[in-house]
Image (cartoon, grey):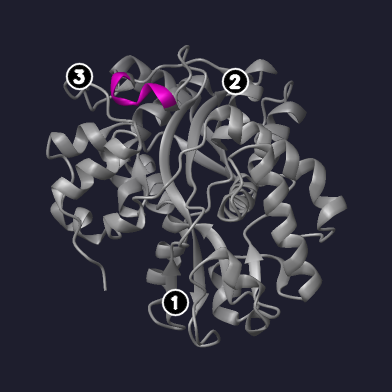
Amino acid sequence: MKTRLSYSARSVFVSTLAIAAALPSLARAEAPQALVDAATKEGMLTVIALPHDWCNYGEVIESFKAKYPGITVNELNPDAGTADELEAIRSNKGNTGSQAPDVVDLGLAFAPAARKEGLLQPYKVATWGEIPDNIKDADGYWYGDYYGVMAFGINKDLVQTSPADWSDLTKAEYAGSVALTGDPRSSAQAILALMSAGISRGAEPGAQSGAKGLELFAELNKAGNFVPVLGKAGTIAQGQTPIIAAWDYNLLAWRDALNGNPPMDVIVPASGVVAGVYVQAISAYAPHPNAAKLWMEYLYSDEGQTGWLKGYCHPARFNAMLKAGKFPQELLDKLPPAEAYEKAIFPTVEALDANKGAIVEGWDKVVGANVK
């Protein structure tokens, strides 16, 4: 059962995340007609790494297609990780065909390096002023789109007692049960799961959290508790991965989709509560740059932001839209209780980068499990 989150509780929650600066009035919701015309002339948008059950992307994509029927949405590898997205840009620099992504949705830790490498191009959406400054590149090369916290998804048919914290996962009762959603050498979600685990062991966010996170997963692997399988809703349902560490919004969407078959718990761990921001960006080599810009305008419009909230993701413009009464009350009522988020840590870009480096470089040596 979900607990209603009051407006006052939301205000405390959001200010705690330090993303509520003075906000201008809401900007226009509709994209300029000239951009719509140019994008429609291109006729295609190529996206990558957007599973339909991630952050309600299925509905978001369908709504974009319905709004702009002259644009075909070409979806590449929905299960790709952030590193795969960037490699797709690199390997298709001279390719204007269907394998070259126009847009990417990246883990925040990967974004500054992607800009430095010249993989991204700048663009500022109409609602740019309502995206908090601390989750966007000042020049428009990347900008936060949504955030959530790391949590556990648990198959209650198979796991009698749900783990309350990361330390519980080492118990013998969880043998052959614990999984990640991606390869920790390339998946932002998996990398942030290890950061959460490391912080729960007293580490500071950064290289130390990466080292401590590797330490915990080495223990899980040695004990036989870690399952080196890419965790999804299907693997939870089938019992292949009864416990998965993933973003809360993914797990809540999976729980709803499974509809009690099997029943599923979603638990925010008692410690090491890491909040993760993902960002949008346009490829520097986008074959359809106007369609890419139109996609961004849609994602950051009232309609696009509300679409993400339906998938339990807190969109970047959450503060401004909440203040203006833009969200349907029934959506606000479905959000998890505020107290689950009160201890959330929003790591800096520098800490994310150091954590990522420690995990990517140390996974094979410290843990040695090939996640696939």
Q: Are marks 2 and 1 in contact (CB under 8 Å)?
A: no
Residue bearing mark 3: 24
Residue bearing mark 2: 120
Q: What's drawn in magenta, residue-wise?
A: 129-134
Q: What residue appears at the point 30 percent right and 57 percent down from the top-left corner? A: 339
82 with respect to 150 (left or right) = right
- Residue 218 picture quarter: bottom right
Q: Is residue 230 at all visible to an observer of this figure?
A: yes
Residue 129, horizontal then vertical, whole percent: 30, 19
Residue 253, horizontal then vertical, whole percent: 41, 63
Q: Quadrant of the C terminus?
A: bottom right
- Judge the density around disc 1: few (<14), some (14-19), many (≥20) Cα neighbours within 10 Å: many
Residue bearing mark 1: 264
Question: Is tag 1's residue or tag 3's residue first in the polypeptide sequence?
Answer: 3
Which element carries disc 1, helix, strand or loop? strand
Magenta span main SS: helix
Q: CA distance from mark 1 to mark 3?
A: 40 Å
- Residue 123 picture quarter: top left
Q: CA distance from mark 2 to mark 1?
A: 39 Å
